[in-house]
Image: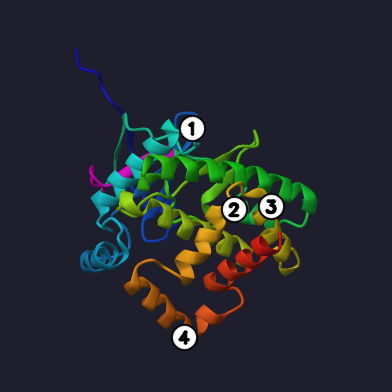
Amino acid sequence: MTTTRERIRVDDLAPHLLLKNGNFLYKLPFRDGFAVLKVYYGSRGFFGRVLKSISNVVFQGQTSYMPRTRLKVERDCMRTWARHGFRVFEVFDDVEVEAPGLRQDGYLLMEFMVRPKLNNYLADSSIPEDERFTTYRRWLQEWSRRHDVAIEERDPRLVHENGDGKHVYILDDGGFLWFDFEMIFRSPNRVAEHVSHEIIQYVWNIHKNIPTEIRERLLDETVEGYPDRERLLRSYDYFFRHPRLFQRMGRAIDRRFYKRARKPTSKYNIARRLRERLERS
C-alpha cells in the first residue's frame, strides 16, 4: 500500500519571501503554524556558482557551492549534529512543496521559529551583563563539547564552517540551536585546524557585534570558560605559525599588505589577544 505524501501548494512564492542572501528563504503556512522553505538555487547565476565552487574546492578545501551539493551537505550535517545531541532545525523530508519554478531537488522545508540570536542577546543592554555572560559560559561548554567530538571522530561535518553568533539561537529551555551548514571543510586529517579556525571566527564575529564596553570581558570569559586551554593556544598557532609553509606565507603576506588584517578587531588581533590572556592567566 502506498502512502500519500503531505503536500504544500503555493501559487506564488514571492509574497512569502523571508530573506534573500545567496539563497531564498520563504515563510510558508504549515499545519498550525509556519515552516521555512530554503531554496538553494539562489541569487547567484550558474557561472557565479561555478566560480565560487572552484574557489571553495581548489583554494579553501571546502565542499562545492553548487546547489545540490549545498543541500546534500546541509542535510547530512544536520543529521550528524542531531545524532550527537546538538539541536538543529527539524526538517520535514516527508512533505512536498509545489510552486511555480521550484525544483524538487533544490530545497529543504524546515521548522520556523523566532528566538534571540547569540550576538543580539549578548549585545542587549536591557539584560543584566552578568546574566548575558552566564549564558555565554553555558554556550562555551556546549561549543567545546562539539569540538571534542569533531576531533575525536575526525569528522569535519561537526565543524561549523559558517560559524558565528548570528547562526545560534538561544532557546526557551536555556539550550542552543545551531544552523547554516551549507558547506564544510573536507579533510578529516585537518579537523583540529578547522576547529581552531572556527574558534577565532566565532570570537571575532561576536566581539565586533557587541558593545565596546563588554568586548574585553568577552575575551576574558572565553579564556576562563572554554575548557581546553591548549586548543585555544593552537588557534593562535594556526593563524601565525601554520604548519603548512604555503598557508603560513599567505597569512604573513595578508598581515603585511592588507590594512583590514592590521585592524584592532581583525581575526589576527583577536587570536593574539586571546593568547596574551592565556599566558597571563
Say which amino acid is labelled 2: Arg
Q: Are marks 3 and 2 in contact (CB under 8 Å)?
A: no
Say which amino acid is labelled 1: Gly
Residue 266 vs residue 70: left or right? right
Question: Is residue 47 or residue 102 the one in the foreground?
Answer: 47
Q: In which quarter of the image is residue 110?
A: top left
- Dot placed on the residue nearer the N-terminal end, 1 or 4: 1
Q: Is residue 158 magenta?
A: no
Q: Which mark is residue 179?
A: none
Between marks 1 and 2 in the image, the one whose residue lies nearer the viewer: 2
The location of residue 211, given as percent across then percent down, is: 71, 66
Say which amino acid is labelled 4: Arg
User: What residue span does the magenta drawing correspond to?
Assistant: 102-110
Instruction: Tell which residue pokes out farthest to the bottom in this image.
Output: 257
Whole-angstrom CA distance, mark 1 to mark 3, is 24 Å
Q: Are marks 4 and 3 in contact (CB under 8 Å)?
A: no
The residue indicated by pointer 4 is 256
Residue 3 vs residue 224: left or right? left
Whole-angstrom CA distance, mark 4 to mark 3, is 31 Å
Say which amino acid is labelled 3: Glu
**SS for dot 2:** helix
Residue 194 vs residue 224: left or right? left
